[in-house]
Amino acid sequence: MPVEGSPPPPAEPDPSAPAGTQPPIAAEPPPPSSDAAEVTDGALDDDAGHRDVPDDILAARARAHDAQQAHGPATELQGDEHLVEAVLGEQLPEEEIRKVAAALDDVEQVPGVPKPDPILVADGITRRFGGLTAVDVDHLEIQRGLITALIGPNGAGKTTLFNLLTGFDKPDTGVWSFEGKSLGRVPAHQVAQNGMVRTFQLTKSLAKLSVIENMKLGATAQKGERFFSAIFKRSWAAQEAEIERRADELLLRFKLDHMRDEYAGSLSGGQRKLLEMARALMVEPKMVMLDEPMAGVNPALTQSLLDHVKDLRTRGMSVVFVEHDMDVVYDISDWVVVMAEGRIIAEGPPEAIGRNQQVIDAYLGTHHGEDLSLKPEATS
Ligand SMILES: Nc1ncnc2c1ncn2[C@@H]1O[C@H](COP(=O)(O)OP(=O)(O)OP(=O)(O)O)[C@@H](O)[C@H]1O
Ligand SMILES: [Mg+2]
């Protein structure tokens, strides 16, 4: 529940605003960090965004363009598979994907239940704002390699929990580990270094930087360990070229390559969400946390975003996403965690969550004025 007169939270300009009602960003919030300020001057130079695009990217763009001309607007993901593999990793074999997806079949459907192969484990996490306990999570495990949806009514504490786990806010109590490594009190950029990146409920792309500069900032601001260790020994110029190349490949993948040199401020709300997801991938994360990636997105782009989220799973990444649209939750999630008033009140596969009376009472039954509990089997 919103707190009257509370100061705005540091990481989210308006966390209590109802989901889906926020307009696409019209005015850009001030740059969130000194990193942003550092690059602003350079990025606004006249020659910014007019650098040479590598030949293989141009060739891949041309192939993608030809394919689109031949087959009409593609709904499938774009990009030369060899380049995509180099950037996002290989797709797991079908059998492996099925095995990973089946891992939770026998897991008990109760809040805080242990998982067979958790990538994230959190214990006793609380965060209070004045008299309000925004987060009070006893125990939470996120299974590796799957898509976990975090749902719950407005003000349930979903964004606050994201902020805590990713180092953008500090809890009053609690410990948590990612890949077995304790992340309590670790600042956000180091969390990203460890392979856990997040996007924001309100997009944080910098309007006065070009799209490509935003992407490159994703690499330099977060300094992803795996990516950077690979290019560490090279000269500065070679590192810069490698970062730009990765950025170009991701832009192609996310169908933003034609906007490469435009200011991010000229993108639509949906394109900004895509840019933020692409930017998060600059650091080769192991887990991606998406806070309402579909909110405010034009339906024409929703499918593309969903396909990108599913694609992360096929490449072995773990995904946690906050979402209010239950159709999306049923479509792409393997497991659902439900929060209400700061606590986890239910966990389970999407179809079971849709039938859970406690969840219907706390959230689904009244959500958007429609009965969301009668859904067919999940298709993901
Ligand atoms: N910095 C802050 N100061 C005071 N109260 C805050 C702050 N951040 C969050 N809150 C409050 O904590 C509660 C949880 O907010 P949070 O943004 O985490 O909810 P949410 O589940 O993400 O909601 P939504 O679905 O609307 O995004 C709300 O009551 C909110 O008003
Ligand atoms: Mg939120």
Image (cartoon, rainbow, N blue to C red):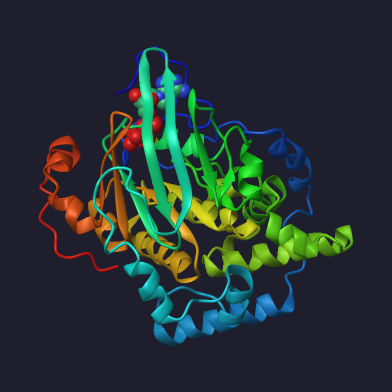
Q: Position of residue 342 (x, y in %)?
A: 33, 30
Across and down, in percent, residue 90 comes to: 55, 76
In the displayed structure image, the side of residue 140 where residue 223 appears, left or right: right
Q: Which residue lies furthest to the right in this view?
A: 235
Q: In this view, does 49 lie to the left or right of 170?
A: right
Q: Residue furthest bottom?
A: 70
- Residue 78 at x, y = what percent? 50, 74
Q: What residue sits 35% from the left and 66% below the top?
A: 103
Does residue 257 show up?
no
At 52% from the left and 67% from the top, the residue drawn is 255
Residue at 44% over, 25% down: 127
Q: Position of residue 166 (x, y in %)?
A: 54, 40
Residue 172 visible somewhere in the drawing:
yes
Q: Indicate whether 316 appears above or below 74.
A: above
258 is higher (above) or lower (below) than 349: below
Q: Quadrant of the C terminus?
A: bottom left
Q: Using the image as rendered, state which of residue 356 and residue 259 is in the foreground.
A: 356
Residue 256 or residue 114, whichever sits in front: 114
Residue 70 sits in quarter: bottom left
How many numbered dots are placed on residues in this image? 0
Q: Residue at x 40, y 48 (%)?
A: 141
Q: In which quarter of the image is ligand 1?
A: top left
Which residue is more in the foreground, 166 or 68?
A: 166
What is the quadrant of the N terminus in the image?
top left
| Residue 211 falls in image quadrant | bottom right
